[in-house]
Image (cartoon, rainbow, N blue to C red):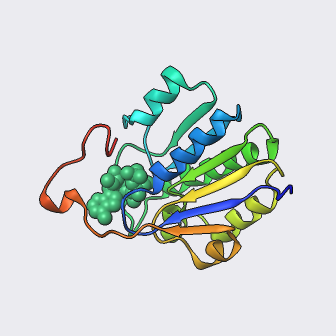
Amino acid sequence: MDTGSLVLVYTGNGKGKTTAALGLALRQIGWDRRVLVIQFMKGKGNVYGERMAAERFLPLLEIEQHGRDEFVNLSNPAELDAELARKALERAEEAMESGEYGMVVLDEVNVAMATGMIDPKEVLALLDKRHKNTDVVLTGRYCPKEIEDRADMVSEVREVKHHFRRGIPAKKGIEY
Ligand code: ATP
Ligand code: MG
């Protein structure tokens, strides 16, 4: 049965949302499908293992960072951050419509919506326009209800424990 493309959401306060999306990306790549990961609110200066892995070993995986190196003020995002988030969404639209990708991951887009930087309605419109062969993954805490309603799959990752609470700082290969 051809079920068409799916909309998959990973949300919640625990660790594992972005890495779950990257796991799906790996599966796609195994089937020779191209994957684009668009990271909202992340600057190009941030070093992530997955980006280096993509550059060195995974020609089918593209990871783009759209944001500033500084943290976004979540309670009151700067206009520049909102502008970069809107540009990331434009890029997502182009990629999702093109049919070039088996999967497009919108990493942290839920937070971009929850903070008001982008309107969930715009994301819904984008989902309507996606190519029939392109699965879309949305990650980040605070996924808006209207997005969850539209999604085919929603998983909530719940924190039971996190090493951060014991004062362990971000670790290579685990956090980045
Ligand atoms: P990962 O990228 O490891 O899959 P994530 O995408 O689920 O994590 P985000 O909400 O994007 O998590 O947060 C980014 C970083 O914050 C992660 O590196 C993670 O280790 C850390 N983090 C996630 N959940 C928690 C938590 N409950 N307490 C403290 N730090 C957390
Ligand atoms: Mg994440």
Looking at the image, which is closer to me, 27 or 151?
Answer: 27
Q: Nearer the viewer, residue 100 or 81?
A: 100
Q: Quadrant of ligand 2?
A: bottom left
What residue is rendered at 67% in x and 54% in y? 136
Q: Quadrant of the N terminus?
A: bottom right
Vertical comparison of 120 with 134: above or below: below
Q: Identify the residue at horizontal 70%, vertical 31% (top origin).
A: 32
Q: Quadrant of residue 152?
A: bottom right
| Percent position of residue 54, x then y | 52, 29
**Direction right: furthest residue:** 1
Drawn side of residue 59 relative to residue 112, left or right: right
Instruction: Tell me if 56 is positioned left or right of 74 in this view.
Output: right
Percent x, y of residue 160: 29, 70
Answer with the quarter of the image where residue 150 lies: bottom right
Task: Tell me if residue 67 can be seen.
Answer: yes
Residue 87, x across and y down, in percent: 62, 48
Q: In the image, residue 83 lies at what x, y percent?
A: 56, 53
Quarter the C terminus occupies: top left
Judge left or right: residue 16 versus residue 120. Answer: left
Which residue is at the far front?
Answer: 1
Q: Residue furthest top?
A: 56
Q: Is residue 71 visible?
A: no
